[in-house]
Structure formats: C-alpha cells, structure tokens
Image: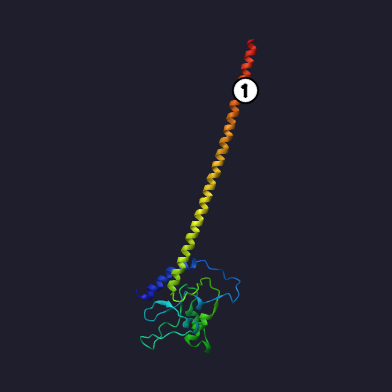
C-alpha cells in the first residue's frame, strides 16, 4: 500500500468522528458570518512526490499560487486541486464546474474555491504551521476533553441524585419506623388501660 492509500485510509477512519463533532449552527447566518476554506485547518494540498496531504501555505490560500518543487525547478510542488480532509467540499468537482476565461488557470480556480463563502459546520480555524492532520489531532483532543468533562459532570450529577435518593429513602424509613413505634406505644398503653379496667371490674364483683 503506497503513501496516498495509507493517507486516504487514515482520513476515512477519521471521517465518522469528524461527523460527530459538535459545530456551531450556521443557520440564519449572514454572508459576513459564513466561513471560507482558505481560513480552515482542514484545507490541505497533496504533495506530488510524497503523496501526503500537507498544510496549504498562505500564498496558496489567498493567491492560488502553488510553489515550485526546488528539486526540479520546473514542476509544481503540490497538485493544483486542494483537499478537504473533513470531506465538506469536493474541490475536484468544483474545479470541473468552473468555466469561463476568468477561471481558465488552476490558480484562478483555486482562489475562487478558497474564497467562496460557505455554510460549513465542519470548519476549524487554521493555525499557521499546523497540517490538516495536526488540526484533526487537535480537534480530537478538544472533543475528548469535552467528552471527559461531560462524563465527570454526569457522574457528579448521578452521584448527587443517588445520595439524594438514599437520603430520602432513609427519611421515609425513619418516618415509617416512628409511625410503627407510636402504634406499638398506643397498643401497649391500650393493653395497660384495658387491664386496669378489667382488674377494677373484677375486684368490684368479688366484693
């Protein structure tokens, strides 16, 4: 299995988890509040030589300018079609649908797609110097911390509820016990009174 297949397999494995990550809803957002791929950490480019998905530097994101491979001096270092590792955008299809003289060059198409405002719930702010994989790892860590925090909070809440139930059961038990004690006292008192009445009656009959 080559590097590209390994990379694709790894990203496919991450995809279901990315789908579950909570994102702020973009419903009813204005165009000014929507996001652009050029600002996203999941936006990357594939290295022509290693086939690995790497960080897209600022010149690629804003100008559509792909650097030349310094080893050859002629070929581009990256493929002209970028990659969204979160699977939120299919740039290959978007490139194919861009027509007209203004979109004739790969750089123009790249700039067009990168600068397009989108309603995307998978957006993660790009941190300069971090690859798409680094952003995935960072997002996973944040999600893990959030899940652990929710688990602890749920545990604390369930623990409080459990102790509250125990305390209520104890109070109910004490209340029932006190009621039985009062009934027993009344019963004993009733027997004593009854015995006294019977004794007095019997004594009177003897006389």
Locate residue 34 relative to residue 69 in the image: left or right.
Answer: right
Give residue 130's quadrant in the image: bottom left
Locate residue 77 relative to residue 30 in the image: left or right.
Answer: left
Mark 1 nearby-residue class (10 Å; few <14, some 14–19, many ≥20) = few
Percent of width and height locating residue 112: 52, 83
Percent of width and height locating residue 67: 42, 85
The N terminus, quarter of image:
bottom left
Evaluate whether residue 136 shows in this view.
yes
Q: Could you say whether the residue bearing mark 1 is in a helix, strand or loop?
A: helix
- Looking at the image, the residue that sits furthest to the left is 1
Percent of width and height locating residue 18: 47, 68
Locate residue 50 relative to residue 105 in the image: left or right.
Answer: left
Could you tell me which residue is drawn at 50 percent across and 78 percent down?
38
Q: Which residue is label 1 attached to?
A: 193
Could you tell me which residue is drawn at 36 percent across and 75 percent down?
3
Evaluate whether residue 16 shows in this view.
no
The C terminus, quarter of image:
top right
Could you tell me which residue is drawn at 54 percent across and 43 percent down?
169
Percent of width and height locating residue 153: 51, 57
Give residue 48's quadrant in the image: bottom left
């Amino acid at each position: 299995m080559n590097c590209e297949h390994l990379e694709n397999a790894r990203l496919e494995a991450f995809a279901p988890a990315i789908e579950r990550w909570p994102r702020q809803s973009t419903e009813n957002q204005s165009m000014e509040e929507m996001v652009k791929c050029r600002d996203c950490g999941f936006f990357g480019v594939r290295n022509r030589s290693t086939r690995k998905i790497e960080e897209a530097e600022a010149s690629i994101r804003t100008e559509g300018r792909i650097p030349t491979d310094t080893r050859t001096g002629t070929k581009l270092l990256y493929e002209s079609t970028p990659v969204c590792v979160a699977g939120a955008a299919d740039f290959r299809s978007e490139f194919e649908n861009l027509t007209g003289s203004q979109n004739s060059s790969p750089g123009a198409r790249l700039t067009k797609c990168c600068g397009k405002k989108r309603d995307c719930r998978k957006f993660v702010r790009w941190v300069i110097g971090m690859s798409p994989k680094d952003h995935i790892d960072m997002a996973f860590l944040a999600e893990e911390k959030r899940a652990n925090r929710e688990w602890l909070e749920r545990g604390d809440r369930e623990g409080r509820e459990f102790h509250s139930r125990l305390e209520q059961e104890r109070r109910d038990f004490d209340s029932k016990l006190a009621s039985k004690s009062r009934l027993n006292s009344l019963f004993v008192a009733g027997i004593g009174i009854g015995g006294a009445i019977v004794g007095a009656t019997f004594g009177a009959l003897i006389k």
